[in-house]
Amino acid sequence: MKKNIYFIYGCAFVLFSLASCGTDTKEPEKTTPVKVEVNRVPAPDFNADSAYAFVKAQVDFGPRVPGTAAHAKCADYLVAKLKSYGLETSIQKGTVQTFDKKQFSLKNIIASFKPDAQSRILICSHWDTRPWADEDTKNADKPFDSANDGPSGVGVAMEVARQISKTQPNVGIDIIFFDLEDYGTSGNNESWCLGSQYWSKNLHKPNYYANFGILLDMVGGPNALFPKEKTSVDYASSAVDKVWKAAADIGYGNYFSPQVKTFVGIDDHVFVNKAGIPCIDIIEYNQATGGFGDYHHTHKDNMDIIDKNTLKAVGQTLLEVIYNEK
């Protein structure tokens, strides 16, 4: 009888052990996710001599007034140069009507580096010339060289394109040169920035998006001061902080003022923001006038006012931002 009892107990113990093994609720070992580190590429040196040459090349065509031979030749030059740096380049064409009821075929020049990269930065400027020096006291009805108002921003962006073709950043870069920015009339904001208005309604790629955009406008004047422009702060404050911090970190805080100023009625970045891309405006502020420099829309806007130190400050800051982005 004892033996039978021991046998029963033994069987029960074995069955209990087997049942316990089958219902083991031990949690699986946790694994720590592997972080993929993106190697930071040091920003290359921005060549101010090269940027200056890009500005001069545009001015040498003559005033790039829409519908003129100079305008067409300059477009061909910019497209050929951007293609030579390996950027995917095209011209966005469209028909627009100006405030004086004239029709123009606009040309927005668009170039992309790493077009398939999801993380992107947009750099833009305008490349057309205003048809009249209407803020001058002499020859107000004639076109002018327009070296700072347009070409300086284009020149900086062209040198950025040259640099990224040699030293590749981790992010994609889009460069857009807007047409017909400067063919407007006082008191009618919608008459300006026709190229960026057209682009904002007809994006060059479906659902196009960039982390942020940077507009360059009048970035070549001597001892230029670039405050934080109010619309930029309202719509893209994080991008403003990023750019101004980069400038301070590399020693260009004397150009990039932390003050916030309201002095721009309308500019291309307004319509980039309307397209859903937070975009800022790096634009010169003149403390004496409380607005733009005394060269603005006058015959003073020529190569004599283009300063390589200012081009360097803006261009090197841009490269610092680009090569720190992931």
Image (cartoon, helix red, strand yellow):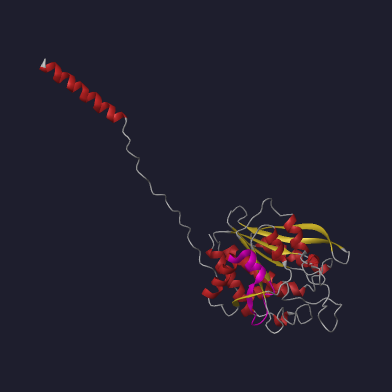
Residue 318 on image: x %, y %: 59, 69
Q: Quadrant of the N terminus?
A: top left
Report the number of numbered marks. 0
The stretch of residues the image draws in magenta is 217-237
At horizontal 75% and vertical 80% (from top left) the residue drawn is 302
What is the quadrant of residue 97 in the picture?
bottom right
Residue 25 on image: x %, y %: 33, 35
At horizontal 78% and vertical 70% (from top left) the residue drawn is 182
What is the quadrant of residue 201 in the picture?
bottom right
Instruction: Decide: is 22 above or below 142.
Output: above
At horizontal 70% and vertical 85% (from top left) the residue drawn is 288
Decide which of 41, 210 is in the foreground and name it: 210
Decide which of 245, 234 is in the foreground and name it: 234
What is the quadrant of residue 113 in the picture?
bottom right
Residue 226 counted in the magenta span: yes
Residue 256 on image: x %, y %: 60, 76
Q: Residue furthest top?
A: 1
Q: Is residue 141 left or right of residue 312?
A: right
Residue 224 on image: x %, y %: 65, 80
Q: Residue furthest right?
A: 101
Q: Is residue 130 left or right of residue 20?
A: right
Q: Is residue 12 left or right of residue 284?
A: left
